[in-house]
Each structure stands twice: as structure tokens, then as C-alpha cells.
Amino acid sequence: MTIALIGVNHKTAPIALREKVAIGRDELAETTRALAATPGVTECMIVSTCNRVELLAVVENCDAPIAGFLSSYFGIDAQVLEPHLYAYHDKEAVGHLFRMAASLDSMVVGEPQILGQVKEAFAVARAAGTVSSQLEHLLQSAFAAAKKARTETGIGSNSVSIASVAVDLARKIFGSLQGRTVFLVGAGKMSEIAARHLVQQGAGAILVSNRTAERARRMAEEISGAIVPQVIDFEQLHEAASRADIVISSTGAPHPIFRPEHGQTFLHKRRNRPMFFIDIAVPRDVDPEMNKLDGIFVYDIDDLQQVAVAHMVERSRQAIDAEALIAAEVERFHQRQRTVNVAPAIVALQKKAEEIRRAEIERMHSRLGTLTPEQLAAVESLTRGLVNKFLHPPMQALKQAARDGDDVRLGALCDEWSVSPAAPAEAECAKEPENTAPERQSVESGGDRHVIDIRSLEGQMGARR
């Protein structure tokens, strides 16, 4: 099996292309199931944010056709999309996922929203039934690594976010935000964060609107403080918008909800007083043509990226430490994974030795005569104890070769003991329940289980007769 990650993001594709493959929250489960139906895909999930759409999958081999999924599913010419795609496999895919979850691949390095977005995508995939053991282990490791990066480095300090960058832009355009009216269109988390920044900078009034009125009321309550936000019916959106100096929009609508004809009306009602639009939606809520109107300033998510660079001097220094930490966590993950992957060879070795042990006991049964239950238990204990001692070194040698990634040594060890590193037996076979029948038991010591040829025990067993 291979871990594959295919995607586009703010570094590889302009917003005009990203919005064509953007997947809304309500569509994510259905799209994830469609990806799972792709030939060769055994597990999968999709991360879709304003800055990226990434397909993460466990596939039977690297030839699984997930690279063409986005173009076929969204009806985009593959020749248009493919130059903007990136593809990673196995260790590179794991590394990219860990960096993404830790916000090292974000437009604003260190921003906290991406980890929550990845967790939400994982929850959707789980609910859709497209996640099994491999992605479960991978994602839990990614979450742990991201948390470690934020707690053990300063990557999350000197807070910089898209919302804070947008507020800085607004302050530059208006000089001061004292008394300005802010209109939040869409009840997303980033809009809420931006609103809090604006209030801190002296905004005078806040309007809130959302297609779902209940969500608008809930956001209004959450950001209520010195200023009590006013909830606007979504049907009254354009009538109310002219009252706002700053509009922050993130609705997830499939088409722009603010177009040039709306902008002209706004300017007329405002007597040409300037109006600032922060469009953090993908697909965009504000038609780029609005920017051509004198007095209207429109910044989309890619524009904010350029402004964010100036804020990142200190965060970049902290990011160096976070990058080193994430690289170490990726290596730890792969060492654990290699150890797991050698389990079939260990199981095969156990099985082979156990077969020899049982065959020898059967062969010597007539010579042992009738044994009491206590004597039988002693024979079992003796043979299994020796098994434990003698198989411990080869077990450890297999595990160490796997941890070191030494395929040549691993192959040599498997050849020496006549087992396959890709034995068909499942690793779970090594986890037998306690107190099972004798023919299915094995001895455990220090986390390892061992079986051995007992020809050398003939003398001891003969003495018990």
C-alpha cells in the first residue's frame, strides 16, 4: 500500500483556479465518498479550505488514478489543472501532511485555523466510512506533531492571522477605525476573529448576516461586548451593505454575491465615501471587477498573502525550530511504521517455530507416557520459556533492521530464517488473547513472543517419566 497526497494550494494555483475545485462543507462527505470509489483507493479524506484542496489517500499502488480525480469530478480540462497540481507519496506525503497540520505550509505560518480544518476533514471522512487503520494512525500522529510544534516552539506567538492582516489593511486605508461600521457577511470563524480585531481597533458598529439566521444570531452573541452587533436578514443584504465602511465576506456561495452594479449603488448611497471589502471566501464572494470602481477597495485571500509577508520576520525565526521538530516527528513516524511493517515476518517466524515445537511434542508423546496436568503444564512452561529466550535475538534483529530502513539486512535475515518480510499472515495474529488453548498459546517477555525447536529438551522430558 502507498500513501498518496495530491492537491493545489495558494502557492501553486491562483484563486481563480482554486475556487473551481473548492468543496463546500455540505459537499465534502459526498466528494470524499466519490474519491473512495476511485479504483485502487482503500482509504481517503479531503482537506478543502480557502487556500488548498488536497486529496489524501491510501492506494494499492502509485498508479491509482487519483491525480485525475479533481479534473474529472469538477469538469476541468486536465491540461489546465495539472501544471498546478503537486503530488507526494509515502514519506514525502507524510511530511507534507505534518507540515500542513502544524501550519508551516499555510499562507500565514503559525495560524491556528488549519489544524481545526484538518481535524474537521478527518471527522467528515470517518463519518463517511472512508477511513480505516492506516489513515487513523497517520492523522493521529499528525495532530500530535502539530500540537508539539505549537507548544515547544514559538510558532504560535506574535499572533499573525489572515484576520489580523485584513484589519491592518483596513486601518491603512481609513487611517483610523474609530467609529467605522463593519458588516460581517457569513458566520465563519475567520470573520469572527476579524470582527474581534476590528472592535479592538475602535470599530463603532457591527452588522452580521448569514443565510442561516440562527448562525448569524449565534455569532452576534459570541462577539457581543462593548458593542452589540445588529443581525441583518440575508434578504436585506444589499440594502444594509451601503451602511458599512468595511465588509468582511465569507459565505461559501458558488458565485459572487457582490457585483459591480451593487458597488455603484453603494457608492451612490454613501456619496462616494470609500468602502473596503475583505473577501476571504473561496469561491470569491466579491466580483474582482468591483475593484475598478473608484472608492471601493477589494482584497481577496491572495492579496492578503502578500501583505502578511511583512508580519512574518519573528514568526519565520520560530518556524525554523518548528520545521526541525516536524522533520524529527516524521522520521519517528516512519520508524514506527517500518517496525509495524515487519510484523508479518515476525508472525511467520513465530508460526514456523510454533509448528516445530508442537510437532516435536507430538513426536515424543509416546515416550513421555501419561503425564499429570501439573507435568503437562511444566512441559509447556519449559518449552515456551526456552522459546522466549532463543527467539528474542532474531526478533530484535528483524525489528532493528526495519527501524534502520535496512532492506538488504532485513531481506538477509528473512532468507536466513526462511520467512518472508511480506508474509500473508496479519500482524494482529501476534496478539492472541490470554488463556487460549495450548495449541494457540505463545510466551511473551518484554513485548516479544518466541517459539523454538525443542529437540534439545528430550533429556529433560525423559527425566520426568
Image (spheres, helix red, strand yellow):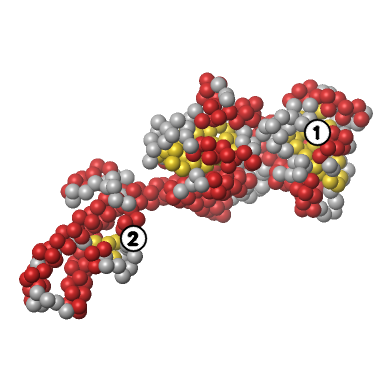
Q: Is residue 163 above or below residue 298?
A: below
Q: Which residue is mark 1?
A: 276
Indicate which disc residue 428 carries. none
Residue kind at label 2, given as amino acid type: Lys
Q: Is residue 217 above or below residue 430?
A: above
Please tell me in which quadrant of the rendered image residue 283 appears.
top right
Between 86 and 22, the one nearer to me in the picture = 22
Q: Is residue 137 above or below residue 177?
A: below
Q: Residue at x 60, y 45 (%)?
A: 117
First in residue order: circle 2 vs circle 1: 1
Residue 162 location (% of width, % of height): 68, 40
Numbered disc in front, either 2 or 1: 2
Residue 24 location (% of width, % of height): 64, 38
Q: Is residue 51 visible?
A: no
Indicate which disc residue 431 carries. 2
Q: Residue at x 44, y 38 (%)?
A: 41
Between 352 and 143, the one nearer to me in the picture = 352
Which of the image's four quarters has the C terminus? bottom left
> What SS does tag 1 mark?
strand
Disc 1 crowd rating (10 Å Cα; few below 14, some 14-19, many 20+) is many
Residue kind at label 1, given as amino acid type: Phe
